[in-house]
Image (spheres, grey):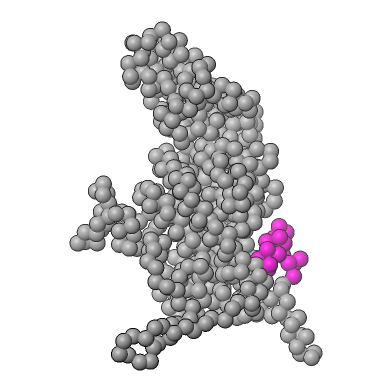
Amino acid sequence: MISLARSQQMMLPIDCNQAPPGFFEICQQLRQFDIAAKTALSVAAPQMVVNAPAVPHIQPPSSAVPHQSSFVPSVYNCLNLQCLCPYFAGNISPDGECYLRNGQILQRSIRKEIRMLNDSERKRFFNAVRQLKASGEYNRLANIHRQEASESGAHSGPSFLPWHREFTKRMEIALRLIDPLVALPYWDSSLDQHLSDPRDSIMWSPILMGESDSNGRVINGPFAGFTTLEGHPTITRHLGKEGHLFTDQNIKAVYDKNTIEGILAYTAPTKACPYPPNYSALEYYHASVHIWVGGDMKPPITSANDPIFFLHHSFVDYIFENWRQMHQNRMQREQVNTDDYPDEITSCTTTLHFADANMRPFNLANRQGLSNAYTDYMYTYEQRPNCSESQPNCHSQFLFCDLLNGPAHCVSKIKLGKSCEQFAGEDACYMGVCSDGYCRTNTATSAVETTCLNDNPCCSLWARNGECTSNAAYMKMYCRKSCNYCKSSDDRRNGCFDRHISCSQMRLQGKCIQRRQWMAENCQASCGWCNIPVHDLCVRAALIGRI
C-alpha cells in the first residue's frame, strides 16, 4: 500500500507554481490538456476487429486491421507537387513539372514574413483567406483545431510541432487551391516586441491585421466581419494585456537546445518523469504569444478563428525547421533511428505523443510529420528580415533598421499618433516622422496636395469613360484630380495610402461612415478599405448618395 501510494504521488502533475513568471497559466493549460488526453484514452472504446466478406473460392475470410482508416485520397494528404497537380487541373510534363492551365509551373511556396510581401502578394493572400472563409472551408479547417486542441497529441508534448506542421500545410494547400501563387506568410512577433508598446505596431492597422475596438472586436482590415465557430459576429483580440511576444533571446534559447527532447519537448510531465520541466520549450514560448494577442487567440479551442493563428504557427514552424537544419542531418530529421525521437515514457507524456501513434485526426503517424518532404517539396522559408550598419535597410515599407538600441536589427514601424521616443531620428513611423516623441504626419513628404483631390471613388472610372468632357460641369467640381484640373504628387504612387493628412483623425471622428464617399476615395488606409477594388468602392459609394 505504501509503495502504491508513493507511485501514485510520483505520477501527479508537476507543480505549476514553480513555473517562471508569466508561465503559470501556460503550465496549467498544458497540464489540463494532458489530463484530458489521458482521460479520453482511458474511456476510449476498444477497437473492434471486423471480418471482411469472403472472397469467392478463397477461405477463410481475412479480418480488417484495427485502427486502419479507409483509403480516401485527398489533396490535403499531398506531400509533393506531383500529388497536388491534378487537384489544380494541371498536367505533369515528362520532366515532372506541373503545368497549370495558364501555362505557369506550380512551384514550391516561399513563406515570407507578412511585412515582406509586396502589395500584390499581400493583396492576393488576403483575398484568398477571405474567399476561403466565404466558402466555409476556412471554418472546416479551423474546427479541426477546435476539436483536437485537447484530448489529442496536438498540445502538451513531443507531437505538438509535427501536428501543427501538418495542420498549417493543409491551410496553405487550401489557400493555393484558390490562388496557386499564394504562400502562407509567417508573423515574426519579435519585430513588434522591440517596440516600447508592441500594440503600436503597424501590424495592428487596417492595412495589415486590423484594429480592435474597446471591446476587442476586430473592426477593420482584411478580416473584419469574420464570424467565429461559436457564432460571434467578429473575431476578438485583447492585445498586450498578458503574455509576451517572441524575443530574440527566446529564439536563441530554442536554437541552443542540443537534444531531441529539448525541441520535441515533454511540456506536461508528471513528477515521475526523469526529464525536468522544460519551460523554455518552443511550445511554451508559442503559447505566450497566443495569450498576448488574447481574445479568440487565447484559448486553443477558439484560436484558429483568427487568421493570425496560422501566421503565428508558420513562424513556430520556421523556428523548428531552422533548429532541424542546425542540429540534424537528413536521416535524423526523418527519425530513422529511435534515438531521433523522444523516449516513449508514460510518466512524461501520453501515448498519443509517441512516434508511431496516430496524428489524430490525420491519417498519419506522428513520426511522419517530421518528414523532409514538407520543406523539400511543399514550401520553404525566406529568412527573417535583417539589416546591418553597413546595409541599414529592411526592404519593407513596414519595417525600419534600428541602429540606436543595440546591434542593428529590423523593427516594425509604428502607427501615427503613437510613441516613437526610443527611436528619435530613425525612420520608425509608418507614413510619418518621429516628432516630439510621437509619430506625426510628415507634411513635407507624405502629405500630398490636399487641394487636389477627388470627392468620389468613381472619379477615375468616370474619367476613363470620357465624363471629363461629356459632363464637364460635374467633373470639374467633384473630380478635379482625375480630370487633371489640378496636379497631385501621388499620381504615380502605388499601394494603399491616405491622400489627406487628417485621415486618421477623421476616422476617429466617424467620418468613414458619415462621409463615406469622400473617405473611400481619399482615406482608404485609415478606413480599412485597402483591399477593395476601385469598381467595388464606386458601387458601394453609389448606394450612399451624393456628397
Identity of the residue drawn at 73% across and 85% down: 7
Q: Main secondary structure of the magenta part?
A: helix
The x, y position of residue 345, in whole percent, is 60, 81
- Between 277 and 328, the one lying in front of the other is 277
Asked if residue 237 lies in the magenta stretch, the reply is no
Q: Which residues are magenta?
A: 15-32
**x, y percentage for residue 290?**
62, 54
513 above or below 90? Answer: above
Q: Which one is nearer the viewer's eye here, 406 or 512?
A: 512
Q: Quadrant of residue 257?
A: bottom right
Any magenta on residue 21? Answer: yes
**Which x, y percent locates residue 367?**
47, 73
Residue at point 62%, 46% (across, down): 232
Compared across the picture, whether 487 is left or right of 437 comes to: left
Which residue is drawn at the image coordinates 56% and 74% (left, top)? 352
The structure residue drawn at horizontal position 55% and vertical position 30%, both measured from the top left corner, is 526
The residue positioned farthest toward the right in the image shown: 2
Name the residue furthest top.
473
Q: Image check: 458 left or right of 289?
A: left
Report the number of numbered marks.
0
Tell me which corner region of the image, top left, top right, bottom left or bottom right, holds residue 287: bottom right
In the rendering, at what x and y percent does residue 380 appear? 40, 57
From the image, which quarter does the N terminus lie in? bottom right
- Vertical relation: 248 (above or below) 214: below
Q: Residue furthest left?
A: 94
- Pick the residue in front: 411 or 35: 35
